[in-house]
């Protein structure tokens, strides 16, 4: 048990240090994330020294259970592919440009519109894709308009990692934790809708109060009318997203697993768009580049972290942690501990670990532990850049656009916004459960 604990903690610490100080290594023209390599080494050490039997790992990876990490990865990648396609079809840029036109010179109006836009897109697509898409847009627009981008960047990042709680597909941590507890799409929404809504309102008020003086100043943006290059393709993409959402909603009633529903929609989109482009003999890039754009480094990272958690369970460490947390004040203990843990080991490994902690809890107490951990995994993402992989990508983007928004600034705003937001979300969850 001690050896497993030392290797696991060392791996988590090295992952955190790699994210902070050496997130990438360059091999010729390729950049490779260091975080997943460290996680993979840690997992291999545990297997090689038989601290977790390979048979156990293999059985867990190939099991027909809902928490099979391969199924969860397929669900996440399928939804991400749909989001990337809609982004490349111009949906996000078109909506952001329309927001600028509607807002005119009024910064407060623009701020409200962009917050609502970020929230809606996050609910129905993916928080990571929204952050990757809107962050460059915000940086570029603010530079052109000669205004401070920080209020908009703080708002975007906080909104994307709060409204991602609304649906089970909003974040891979939601998928893993909810699936581990056999919570379906509708039951998840019934519980999480109100905590997400009130948390979103809370953080919005806080951000407005923080930046109100700056937002009162008028702006003179240089706006160009953005047009969709191929409307039929965009319509096909939106239809596939809607069908996917409908299938996910009714999946538990028609005995269709969520990973399969999303995979079918993503595969259908690829086949239809590729066929249309081949028929029209388009010179545009064909769709394999969409496959290449997927976050493939997440695969070895998630599997490696899954192996570490299997080892932690095998050695009885998870059981000990679960006993320490106990079965009273469950929402408070699991909510805040997951919130902190996400910023120590990142929210994806945190979700994998926390899915195994409440194994001795039952009924409503078990649900409280799972749902409060979901809240912690989402809102914990904007306490520090370490809280989620999106935070790492976000800080890299701001550096690329010469925006001074470093680690200290991120934490400063993160503490002010995230702690009241998670407190409201957890308090609301207490009412729901």
Image (spheres, rainbow, N blue to C red):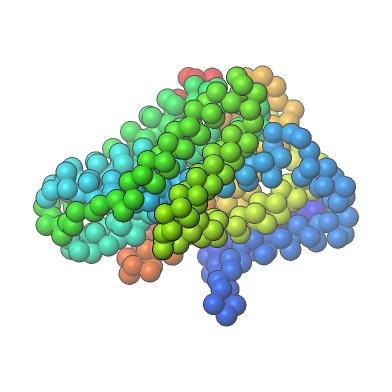
Task: Give the residue at x 33% y 46%.
Answer: 231
Indicate left or right for 54 with 177 as reference.
right
Indicate left or right for 171 with 365 as reference.
left
Q: Position of residue 2 (x, y in %)?
A: 81, 53
Q: Nearer the viewer, residue 52 or 294?
A: 294
Give the image quarter of residue 10. Answer: bottom right
Q: Nearer the viewer, residue 47 or 103?
A: 103
Q: Nearer the viewer, residue 255 or 408?
A: 255
Q: Is residue 162 above or below residue 274?
A: above
User: In what quadrant of the picture does the C terminus appear?
Assistant: top right
Q: Position of residue 344 (x, y in %)?
A: 58, 53
Q: Position of residue 360 (x, y in %)?
A: 74, 28
Task: Give the residue at x 48% y 55%.
Answer: 278
Q: Position of residue 267 (x, y in %)?
A: 57, 44
Give the image quarter of residue 17. Answer: bottom right
Residue 341 visible, this orientation: no
Indicate left or right for 67 with 346 as reference.
right
Indicate left or right for 316 with 40 as reference.
right
Residue 301 visible, this orientation: yes
Task: Give the residue at x 29% y 61%.
Answer: 139
Q: Nearer the viewer, residue 276 or 385?
A: 276
Task: Give the residue at x 45% y 62%.
Answer: 285
């Amino acid at each position: 048990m001690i050896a497993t604990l030392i290797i696991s903690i060392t791996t988590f610490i090295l992952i955190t240090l790699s994210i902070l100080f050496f997130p990438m290594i360059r091999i010729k023209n390729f950049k490779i994330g260091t975080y997943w390599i460290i996680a993979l080494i840690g997992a291999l050490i545990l297997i090689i020294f038989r601290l977790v039997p390979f048979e156990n790992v293999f059985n867990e990876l190939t099991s027909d259970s809902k928490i099979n990490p391969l199924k969860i990865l397929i669900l996440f990648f399928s939804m991400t592919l749909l989001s990337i396609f809609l982004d490349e079809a111009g949906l996000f840029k078109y909506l952001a440009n329309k927001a600028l036109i509607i807002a005119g010179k009024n910064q407060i109006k623009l701020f409200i519109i962009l917050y609502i836009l970020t929230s809606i897109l996050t609910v129905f697509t993916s928080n990571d894709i929204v952050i990757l898409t809107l962050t460059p847009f915000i940086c570029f627009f603010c530079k052109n308009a000669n205004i401070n981008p920080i209020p908009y960047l703080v708002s975007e990042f906080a909104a994307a990692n709060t409204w991602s709680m609304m649906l089970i597909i909003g974040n891979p941590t939601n998928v893993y934790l909810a699936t581990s507890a056999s919570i379906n799409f509708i039951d998840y929404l019934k519980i999480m809708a109100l905590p997400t809504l009130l948390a979103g309102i809370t953080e919005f008020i806080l951000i407005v109060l923080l930046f109100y003086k700056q937002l009162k100043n008028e702006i003179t943006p240089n706006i160009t009318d953005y047009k969709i290059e191929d409307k039929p393709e965009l319509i096909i993409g939106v239809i596939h997203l809607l069908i996917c959402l409908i299938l996910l909603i009714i999946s538990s009633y028609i005995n269709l697993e969520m990973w399969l529903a999303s995979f079918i929609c993503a595969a259908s989109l690829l086949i239809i768009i590729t066929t249309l482009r081949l028929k029209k003999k388009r010179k545009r890039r064909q769709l394999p580049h969409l496959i290449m754009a997927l976050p493939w480094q997440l695969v070895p990272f998630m599997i490696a972290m899954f192996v570490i958690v299997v080892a932690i369970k095998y050695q009885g460490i998870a059981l000990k942690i679960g006993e320490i947390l106990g079965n009273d004040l469950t929402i408070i203990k699991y909510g805040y501990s997951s919130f902190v843990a996400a910023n120590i080991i990142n929210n994806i490994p945190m979700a994998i670990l926390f899915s195994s902690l409440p194994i001795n809890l039952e009924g409503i107490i078990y649900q409280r532990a799972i749902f409060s951990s979901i809240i912690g995994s989402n809102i914990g993402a904007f306490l520090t850049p370490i809280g989620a992989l999106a935070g790492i990508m976000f800080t890299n983007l701001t550096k690329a656009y010469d925006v001074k928004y470093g680690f200290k600034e991120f934490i400063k705003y993160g503490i002010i916004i995230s702690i009241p937001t998670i407190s409201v979300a957890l308090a609301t969850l207490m009412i729901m459960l």
